[in-house]
């Protein structure tokens, strides 16, 4: 299998052969082409991840035999020299510590017992972790460190959401503290011992040069929230319904007040010519007549007799004539009915 160093050596051979071929053809322009090719190869050598000693030796020898000037060859070789024996950077494994309280110093314990801010205590724990080389802790170790602070009396970590935020702040402080406490060369502890006595000698002398270990054996208890999906870190129903600010609450209250005023105005006044908004009035129920008498008195009182209705009396002939005269009838129609009948009989009877 061809390595990246071997590929670059083959490319360098092709470029040098190309420059030798073009030297006679390009004339005075050949120097510019050679300079541009040198800059390109210099950048490729700089970006190369690694080369073995054999590949570096072959590449340096090839550069010395190429059509480069003395200055150009030096620039190329300077990019080859740091690559000798350099291997690919390996990813460091995560570290684990299950007894962080044992690595606290006497000054650390004294500060953690004071009522200082949570950020100060998290920063103190981050500096202690960086000083003992605990710079790549796994998730459970980060939660264990914050839980140790809670066990030592740090307030504000009882809630799951606050605990998760404290873990995030601790990681941020640890990243900053690791730049001030570089690890010793070749020292990377995967699993930490139970006490500072098990640390390597260079690490222990550097971490506790001015402050001796306190020998604390506190074992934290309780649940640790390390993920946002944890149920303890989710907001409760009361927090979800609670508005984020007083300004939003005042706006909602004013809007509700305006709606109630509009509803009351429609219910009281209404619109005269618009029947859509008016409500149908319920039919009034017949109200019983008020009486001062009791039910017993009503039972003893005899029923009132209704007055007799006026019966119509037959009209006399004079009254009939008077009514007919008022209606504008002729005099011949005022003849009594009996005389008419008599005349009709006489006319019908035979002679």
Image (tube, rainbow, N blue to C red):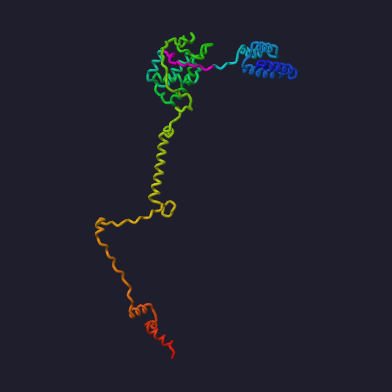
- Which residue is nearer to you in this view: 281 or 105? 281
User: Which residue sits at x=41%, y=86%?
Assistant: 345
Q: Quadrant of the N terminus?
A: top right
User: Which residue sits at x=38%, y=47%?
Assistant: 264
Instruction: Give the percent coordinates (x, y) of residue 203.
Output: 48, 10
As drawn, the residue found furthest toward the bottom would be: 351
User: Residue 314: which quarter of the image?
Assistant: bottom left
As drawn, the residue found furthest toward the top would be: 201
User: Residue 234: which quarter of the image?
Assistant: top left
Q: Does the magenta run of residues contain 100? A: yes
Residue stretch rendered in magenta on the structure: 93-105
- Which residue is nearer to you in this view: 327 or 118? 327
User: Residue 51: which quarter of the image?
Assistant: top right
Q: Is the magenta stretch mostly helix, strand or loop?
A: loop
Q: Quadrant of the C terminus?
A: bottom left
Instruction: Give the percent coordinates (x, y) of residue 304.
Output: 27, 63
As drawn, the residue found furthest toward the right would be: 24
Instruction: Give the percent coordinates (x, y) of residue 293.
Output: 25, 57
User: Is 224 situated above or below 191?
Assistant: below
User: Is 168 situated above or below 269?
Assistant: above
Instruction: Give the percent coordinates (x, y) of residue 22.
Output: 73, 18
User: Is 130 situated above or below 227?
Assistant: above
User: Is 39 situated above or below 256?
Assistant: above
Q: Does the magenta run of residues contain 44? A: no
Callout count: 0
């Amino acid at each position: 299998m061809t390595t990246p160093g071997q590929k670059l050596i083959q490319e360098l051979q092709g470029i040098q052969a190309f420059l030798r071929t073009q030297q006679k053809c390009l004339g005075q322009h050949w120097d510019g082409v050679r300079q541009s090719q040198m800059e390109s190869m210099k950048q490729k050598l700089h970006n190369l991840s690694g080369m073995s000693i054999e590949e570096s030796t072959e590449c340096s020898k090839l550069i010395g035999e190429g059509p480069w000037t003395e200055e150009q060859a030096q620039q190329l070789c300077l990019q080859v020299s740091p690559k000798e024996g350099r291997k690919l950077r390996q990813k460091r494994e995560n570290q684990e510590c299950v007894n962080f309280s044992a690595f606290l110093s006497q000054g650390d314990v004294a500060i953690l017992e004071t009522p200082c801010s949570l950020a100060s205590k998290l920063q103190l724990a981050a500096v202690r972790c960086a000083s003992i080389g605990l710079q790549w802790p796994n998730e459970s170790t980060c939660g264990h460190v914050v839980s140790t602070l809670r066990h030592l009396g740090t307030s504000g970590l009882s809630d799951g959401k606050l605990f998760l935020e404290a873990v995030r702040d601790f990681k941020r402080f640890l990243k900053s503290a690791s730049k001030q406490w570089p690890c010793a060369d070749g020292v990377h502890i995967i699993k930490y011992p139970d006490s500072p006595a098990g640390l390597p000698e260079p690490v222990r002398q550097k971490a506790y040069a001015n402050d001796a270990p306190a020998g604390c054996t506190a074992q934290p208890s309780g649940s640790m929230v390390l993920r946002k999906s944890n149920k303890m870190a989710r907001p409760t129903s009361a927090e979800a319904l609670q508005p984020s600010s007083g300004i939003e609450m005042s706006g909602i209250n004013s809007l509700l007040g305006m709606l109630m005023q509009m509803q009351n105005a429609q219910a009281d006044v209404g619109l005269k010519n618009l029947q859509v908004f008016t409500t149908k009035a319920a039919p009034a129920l017949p109200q019983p007549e008020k009486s001062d008498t009791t039910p017993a008195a009503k039972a003893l009182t005899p029923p009132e007799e209704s007055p007799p209705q006026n019966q119509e009396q037959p009209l006399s002939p004079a009254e009939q004539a008077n009514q007919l005269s008022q209606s504008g009838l002729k005099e011949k129609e005022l003849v009594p009915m009996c005389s008419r009948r008599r005349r009709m009989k006489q006319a019908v009877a035979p002679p």
